[in-house]
Amino acid sequence: MHNTIQISEGLYYVGGSDRTLSRFENLYPVPRGMAYNSYLLLDEKTVLFDTVDETVADLFLENIAHVLGGRTLDYLVVHHMEPDHSATILRLLQSYPTVTVVASAKALQMMENFFPFTNERTLAVKEGDVLKTGEHTLSFIGAPMVHWPEVLFSFDEKTGTLFSADAFGTFGALDGHIFADETQYGCDFSEARRYYFNIVGKYGVQVRNVLKKAAALPIETVCPLHGPIWRKNFGTFLKLYDVWSKYEPEERGAVLFYGSIHGHTAEAAQLLASAIAEHGARVEVLDVSAVDLSELVAEAFRFSHPVFLSATYNLGIFLPMEQLLSDLGAHLYQNRKYAVVENGSWSPQAGSLIENIVSGWKNMERIGERVTILSSVKEAQTEALRKLGERIAEDIRSES
Ligand SMILES: Cc1cc2nc3c(=O)[nH]c(=O)nc-3n(C[C@H](O)[C@H](O)[C@H](O)COP(=O)(O)O)c2cc1C
Ligand SMILES: [Fe+2]
Ligand SMILES: [Fe+2]
């Protein structure tokens, strides 16, 4: 079977979507599957941009044979060596033994570490290098640590097409449409946000470096390695990348993360949320035991005012909350105003432990006093939570 789609004159989509995968990278749930994009350009020379994950390899190889229609494959450009895009290189080389692999020197070295062979036909390229394929000229742009060290973008000068590796990718299979402007994607970036913050987000500085270089290019179309292709309204996505890579909140609002064993801390979260909403600010409540960690991380980055409410657990922080804090720290979470609520039946400790962790992050300012609950919310804590909610709401509204 083959399933290819023409993108523009001479350029074809030859990738595929996997809907059987439960967790991307064996970690992030992908209930709507995952797309592994690959693109084939027919010019005087034929050029394939990246391979795909093993799960869609058969379809991919049939797609290439179909589009080539008997021609040979001249170049394989490898933008990124992570196996979701490189796993099929060996099979591709077996099918097209005369293909020249075009990649950064680092990627070529990584290739030898991944595969039990040394490929003789290689062309090492770096930023500023160009490859003429006939009517098209490809130029290469270094994108180190977006999100691996060897990453390159390439740019087709004739059509203004940017091949952006994992940047501007998203979780989710392609639903027949391959262009972002044919779908609702672009109204709701929740899966793109979750993808960005969990996979690329730690490397905000490196993302900004490559955004600067991209700004100088006359981009018409962006072809990422996951998710839809952008040919219209790319500015919307670019603006989000600008905000995200600066670690700035995307929306002014509170996000309440609660970790509760028997439900009392959950009640406190609900009460606090009501107070914030009552005072006119946006608020969202998330149970750290129920919502996937990747979603918690994405929502933390989305909002300006996180609140951490946790039960004390063996003189520590309730485990899913501890895990969230550890993941946020690892992703360089910063630039937020935060509040803390703790609960304990004999020796509440969670609050000070949370504050210790958060105080190690950059530009985090605590708002209001820590609220301590002894087992259940009484009148005094109801009052304290209402006050805290009002304070948070005022702060959110003050800068909006
Ligand atoms: C395994 C376990 C360990 C706990 N360790 C502590 C503790 O070290 N200090 C404390 O004050 N409470 C501890 N607690 C009690 C809870 O923190 C306390 O009952 C709290 O009110 C639970 O809030 P919740 O109703 O939101 O679950 C522990 C509870 C459990 C189940
Ligand atoms: Fe990757
Ligand atoms: Fe990827």
Image (cartoon, rainbow, N blue to C red):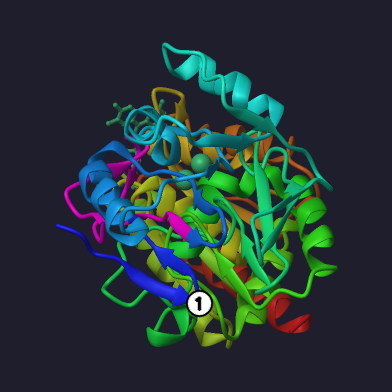
Q: In this picture, is 211 found above or below 144?
A: below
If the image is split into quadrants, where does the N terminus sit? bottom left
Q: What segment carries the magenta color?
A: 16-40
Q: Position of residue 201 (x, y in %)?
A: 62, 49
Answer left or right for 144 relative to 122.
Answer: right
Frontmost residue, 112 versus 373:
112
Give the labeled residue for mark 1.
Answer: 9
Answer left or right for 297 relative to 369.
Answer: left
Q: Local crowd at mark 1 within 10 Å, few (<14), some, or many (≥20)?
A: few
Residue at 62% over, 41% down: 147
Q: Is residue 172 visible?
A: no
Residue at 52% over, 60% down: 224
Q: Position of residue 359 (x, y in %)?
A: 74, 39
Q: Position of residue 29 (x, y in %)?
A: 30, 48
The secondary structure type at the circle numbered 1 is loop
Q: Is residue 123 magenta?
A: no
Frontmost residue, 232 versus 377:
232
Amino acid type for the residue under numbered disc 1 = Glu
Q: Is residue 21 magenta?
A: yes
Residue at 42% over, 66% down: 12
Frontmost residue, 283 versus 376:
283
Residue at 77% over, 82% down: 398
The mark total stands at 1
Residue 400 position by quadrant = bottom right
